[in-house]
Image (cartoon, rainbow, N blue to C red):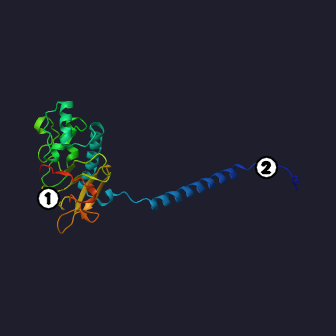
Amino acid sequence: MQPQPPPNAPAPPPSEAALLSRKKWEWLWMVGVASIIILALAGLTPPLTAGRGRSPDQTEAVNHARQIGMALWEFQTHYGSRPDGSTIEAVRQETSTNLKLGTKSSNDFFRQLLAVGIVNDESMFYAKITGARKPDSFLPGTKALEKGECAFTYFAGAPKDCSPQRPVAITPAIAGTDRFDPKPFKGKAILLRMDNSVTTLPIRESNGQVWFDGQNLMDPSHPIWEGHAPAIAWPEL
């Protein structure tokens, strides 16, 4: 019979097997906790599949709208406002551009972005709508943003202190009207705002209008315009 150790004797060191067993259970416990955290986060996070139901054409248009927003913001930082009639002369003097700069169409206004070099590719102005075609990015002279190479309607004349939610560009508007074509994006219109957020709004089946906060978005009296009705410039299609 082996003698018993005194009560105050230190415990013997754990065996190698005991250490391995302890490490195994610690590892399993950590894996279990991590799994619980991952599952909990997965339950809280909405799935990011297929742009949440967007078609590829709609996703492309949304991405291009954001790129336009960033280019317009950079332009405003330099010239004090988004492209409008008042910035044409400043752009011409600074760049000596030979691009056609005007105020009749969104193509005219967006050419200011090309003239100052903020944009050197026409592709961001494209969306797959009726009458539009893939831009060729051939930019000299009258070839920049030719007819069909721009798909976004532009709302010019925004005051400097306007709401961040004020509309800046939209597609697919029907030129010369307050209506939209429901076919390209499954009954949706794609709207870019001053804060560079992009949202999709339903197009009414009854009249082709886009309503926002209970009123036709294109109505100059809509509160979103804050008393400053936009100069609507449709694309050349």
From the viewer's perspective, is 115 left or right of 44? left
Callout 2: few (<14), some (14-19), or many (20+) C-alpha neighbours within 10 Å? few
Dividing the picture into quadrants, the one containing residue 179 is bottom left
Q: Is residue 96 above or below residue 131?
A: above
The disc labelled 1 sits on which kind of residue? Thr
**Left or right: 222, with 42 as reference point:** left
| Location of residue 119 with respect to 162 vertically, above or below | above
* Label 1 residue SS: loop
- What residue is disc 1 on? 177
Q: Residue furthest bottom?
A: 206
The image shows residue 29 at horizontal and vertical percentages of 60, 56
Going from N to C along the chain, the mark reached first, 2 or 1, is: 2
Q: Residue at x 14, y 57 (%)?
A: 174
- Is 214 rendered above or below residue 15? below
Residue 134 shows in this picture: no
Tell me the amino acid under the disc marked 2: Pro
Label 2 sits on residue: 12
For the residue pair 141 and 10, the one nearer the viewer reads as 141
Query: Where is residue 130 shown, x and y percent of the image?
Result: 14, 55
Residue shown at 16%/45% (left/top)?
Answer: 107
- Of tags 2 and 1, the one toward the viewer is 1
